[in-house]
Image (cartoon, rainbow, N blue to C red):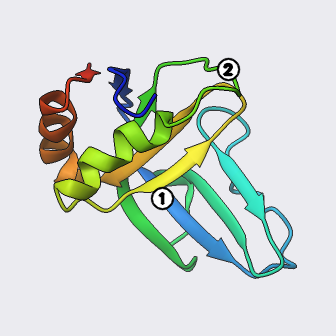
Amino acid sequence: MSSAQLSLSVMEDLFSVCRLAPDAEIPHWVPAEGFVSVTRTADELSIVCLSGAVPETVRTERDFRALKIEGPFDFSLTGILLAVIGPLADAGISIFAVSTYDTDYVLVKKNDLKQAVSALSAFGHTVR
């Protein structure tokens, strides 16, 4: 499926990717609605949420825009994320990916959004 033409939509908001200690509680400032991802591993607690919600004291990378791959997709399909991140990598655009049960989201720095949309469109994807 890596050569499939996909539909993506650009989310309007700015997002941040935060890193907290692996044993940290989920902070009170994490929004209860909207696009939020919380992932805990043995090494860290990683949170993706609206940039405006994140206190300045938190270790974070700010100013990401999110591209939603329009799903849902069956778990048996392969290459969906590769079909998006491949053209972005070829264009030299760094990404942060978040996967959910239904689909994937690819975050790019806001300054790279225009170039990302161009690269995806040139590959044959529809970006709105």
Tell me if I can see residue 14 in this picture.
no
Quadrant assignment, res 102 = top right
In the picture, measured across the screen, residue 106 lies left or right of residue 33, that is left
Identity, as a three-letter code, of the amino acid under mark 2? Asp
Q: Relative to 60, is 88 above or below?
A: above
Mark 2 / mark 1, whichever is N-terminal = 1
User: Residue drawn 43% across and 44% down?
Assistant: 82
Kindly identify which numbered label has been placed on residue 65: none
**Secondary structure category for the residue under label 1:** strand
* Marker disc for residue 16: 1
Viewer-side label of 2, 1:
2
Please tell me whether residue 17 is drawn above or below residue 23 in the rendered image. above
- The residue sitting at 31% across, 62% down in the picture is 94
In this figure, which residue is indicated by the disc labeled 2? Answer: 74
Quadrant occupied by the C terminus: top left
Q: Is residue 24 left or right of residue 112?
A: right
Instruction: Give x and y (percent) for residue 89.
Output: 27, 57
